[in-house]
């Protein structure tokens, strides 16, 4: 009894020491990073007044006469992210069968599909757009392609993980009733696959919507281009309207996908 | 993965993966409607965007051909590039840590169960911060304070506060009401209830969300440079502007290595946190 009490105390002491060590490490890294980037509270405070003045005076009131000319870019943005999500989802659906351990015909194929997807996923859409602009020229095509690439990267892995988690018991059970292959897919595989499939696709749509507002900045069309252009021309009140539209788009997408997801579960 | 996530992706697949028995799948008219709308909208989108498919073909050829220029990657300027990569990490760390500190405080005023009066206000405010993408914040801050890492840090900080406050508040709201009730019954004040009752319950999930946010922010930080907010994105934009494709491919590799190793490290960390929690 006494020994276990001693042990517990030791354990608690060790845990406490670990927590302190971790905290000290975080503080140290942060301080070092702040030093290297010349970040200081003084510069923030000095900058803060300027930021408030800039946002308060130059940005507001928003110039709503620009609204009409921004509808086009906004529709572009919506279309880009939606089309990219759908195309990305279709491609990923095919690829995920090769990326899931349970369905992939060859081990090396699974590994290489996963590796490619990891590259696609881990290089941000904006960088992809930057790389693609040189080949495809400016325009919505580049934005869409960049988002398709990251969509394939994210969704293939997500779908593959859903496939791997499919309960084979259910599949066996359906097969045992003498069901044909299409019947097995329809009654055992799809019902398990579908909710996750739609959930992840909607999630990627959300991400695409956010990203597509930015891709315009490097020449991919949409609202990002309007924001970048307006800032360069010092038309801040117009930019303000564009940013408000981004906010509305992002929040609306979040709301709709959230509602759909609720219905799905 | 670069953009912000307000919905935990790791648990998501697992949660939605659970379904009702296959035989009794009911048809939800709203979902069917949404699917039909989605299909129609997809066609509309394709028509609206009016892609030049000849350009798609030509561009793809040009892109494939440009791979010859991408290889071998040119690491001649590895010193400034690696310095920029480090700056990217610094920006992400400072921005995220500050955001965690601020969100930690704000969350207690944003949770319905412990601060019903201030919750709607704080929640509305942070959702505004969250809805503006980090890159747009960076653009605004660049105009206000000039180029360099400072606007990058501020941009990451602002957006991360928006997301972390929401996630932290959600964790607080999930704390069992009984725990709070029990503490209140002992005559503990608000602060004491928070420190003794709420904090121990939420510490793990706070930690998990912070780690997750750091991962997202490092991804975000790599692209901030494209608009001039410091870091490796600047090197990439520069290389592409000068048609130095081989340097660009080296920068791309560095970015991939950075983001990938962070994803790898945080996955391990998350697993450990999950095991403990």
Image (tube, coloured by chain):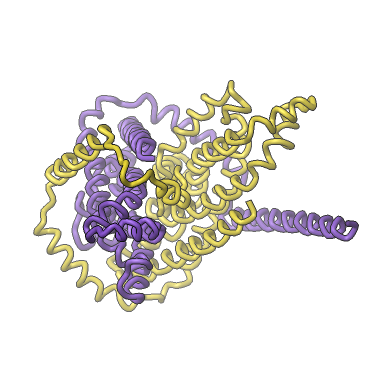
Chain colours: A purple, B yellow
Residue extending farthest to the top is: B117
Q: Residue furthest left?
A: B54
Count all numbered tags in the image, as a single digit: 0
- Quarter of the figure with the C terminus of chain A: top left
Horizontal relation, residue A82 to residue A12: left or right: left
Seen in the image, is B216 located left or right of residue A20? left
Name which residue lies at 14% across and 44% down.
Answer: B43
Residue at screen point 24% across, 34% down: A70
What is the quadrant of residue B198 in the picture? top right
| Residue A206 x/y as whole percent | 35, 43
Residue A253 vertical placement versus B251 (above, below): above
Q: Which residue is pictured at 62% across the width and 32% down the height?
A: B108
Point out residue B151 in the picture as x, y percentages from the top left corner.
48, 46
Q: Is residue A117 in view?
A: yes
* Quadrant in the picture for residue B107: top right
Q: Residue furthest front?
A: A177
Residue A36 or residue B264, whichever sits in front: B264
Q: Residue A182: x and y, percent?
A: 21, 57
What percent of the width, then of the height, locates residue A194? 31, 49
Q: Along the line of sight, which residue is nearer the eye, A20 or B133?
A: A20
Decide which of A211, B188 is in the foreground and name it: B188
Residue in the picture at 27% in, 53% down? A89
Q: Is residue A80 above or below residue A56?
A: below
Q: Is residue A219 visible?
A: no
Question: Looking at the image, is B124 positioned above or below residue B24?
Answer: above
Residue farthest right in this picture: A2
- Indicate the quadrant containing the N terminus of chain A: top left, top right, bottom left or bottom right: bottom right
In which image quadrant can residue A135 be found?
A: bottom left
């Amino acid at each position: 009894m006494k020994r276990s009490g001693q042990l517990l105390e030791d354990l608690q002491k060790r845990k406490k020491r670990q927590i302190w060590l971790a905290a000290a490490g975080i503080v140290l890294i942060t301080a070092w990073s702040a030093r290297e980037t010349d970040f200081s509270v003084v510069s923030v405070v000095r900058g803060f007044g300027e930021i408030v003045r800039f946002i308060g005076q130059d940005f507001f009131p928003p110039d709503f006469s620009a609204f009409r000319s921004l509808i086009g870019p906004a529709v572009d943005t919506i279309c880009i992210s939606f089309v990219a999500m759908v195309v990305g989802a279709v491609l990923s659906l095919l690829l995920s069968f090769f990326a899931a351990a349970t369905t992939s015909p060859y081990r090396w194929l699974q590994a290489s599909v996963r590796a490619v997807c990891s590259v696609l996923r881990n290089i941000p859409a904006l960088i992809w757009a930057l790389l693609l602009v040189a080949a495809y020229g400016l325009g919505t095509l580049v934005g869409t392609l960049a988002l398709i690439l990251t969509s394939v990267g994210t969704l293939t892995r997500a779908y593959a993980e859903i496939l791997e988690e499919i309960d084979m018991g259910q599949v066996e059970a359906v097969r045992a009733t003498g069901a044909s292959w299409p019947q097995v897919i329809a009654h055992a595989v799809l019902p398990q696959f579908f909710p996750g499939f739609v959930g992840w696709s909607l999630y990627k749509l959300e991400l695409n919507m956010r990203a597509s507002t930015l891709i315009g900045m490097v020449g991919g069309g949409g609202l990002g281009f309007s924001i970048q252009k307006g800032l360069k021309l010092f038309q801040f009140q117009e930019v303000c309207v564009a940013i408000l539209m981004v906010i509305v788009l992002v929040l609306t997408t979040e709301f709709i996908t959230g509602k759909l997801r609720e219905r799905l579960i | 993965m670069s953009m912000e996530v307000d919905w935990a992706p790791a648990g998501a697949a697992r949660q939605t993966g659970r379904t009702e028995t296959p035989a009794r799948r009911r048809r939800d008219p709203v979902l069917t409607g949404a699917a039909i709308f989605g299909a129609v909208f997809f066609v509309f989108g394709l028509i609206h965007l009016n892609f030049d498919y000849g350009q798609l073909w030509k561009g793809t050829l040009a892109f494939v051909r440009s791979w010859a220029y991408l290889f071998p990657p040119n690491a001649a300027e590895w010193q400034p590039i690696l310095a920029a990569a480090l700056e990217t990490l610094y920006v992400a760390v400072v921005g995220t840590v500050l955001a965690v500190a601020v969100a930690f405080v704000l969350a207690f005023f944003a949770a319905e169960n412990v601060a019903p009066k201030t919750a709607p206000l704080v929640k509305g405010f942070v959702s505004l911060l969250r809805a503006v993408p980090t890159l747009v914040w960076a653009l605004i801050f660049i105009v206000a304070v000039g180029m360099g890492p400072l606007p990058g840090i501020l941009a990451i900080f602002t957006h991360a506060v928006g997301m972390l406050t929401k996630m932290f508040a959600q964790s607080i709201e999930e704390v069992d009401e009984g725990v709070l009730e029990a503490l209140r019954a002992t005559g503990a004040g608000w602060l004491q209830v928070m420190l003794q009752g709420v904090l121990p319950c939420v510490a793990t999930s706070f930690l998990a969300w912070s780690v997750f946010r750091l991962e997202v922010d490092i991804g975000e930080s790599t692209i901030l440079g494209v608009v001039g907010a410091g870091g490796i994105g600047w090197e990439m934009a520069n290389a592409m502007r000068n048609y130095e494709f081989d340097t660009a491919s080296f920068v791309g590799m560095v970015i991939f290595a950075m983001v990938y190793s962070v994803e790898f490290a945080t996955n391990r960390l998350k697993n450990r946190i999950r095991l403990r929690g």
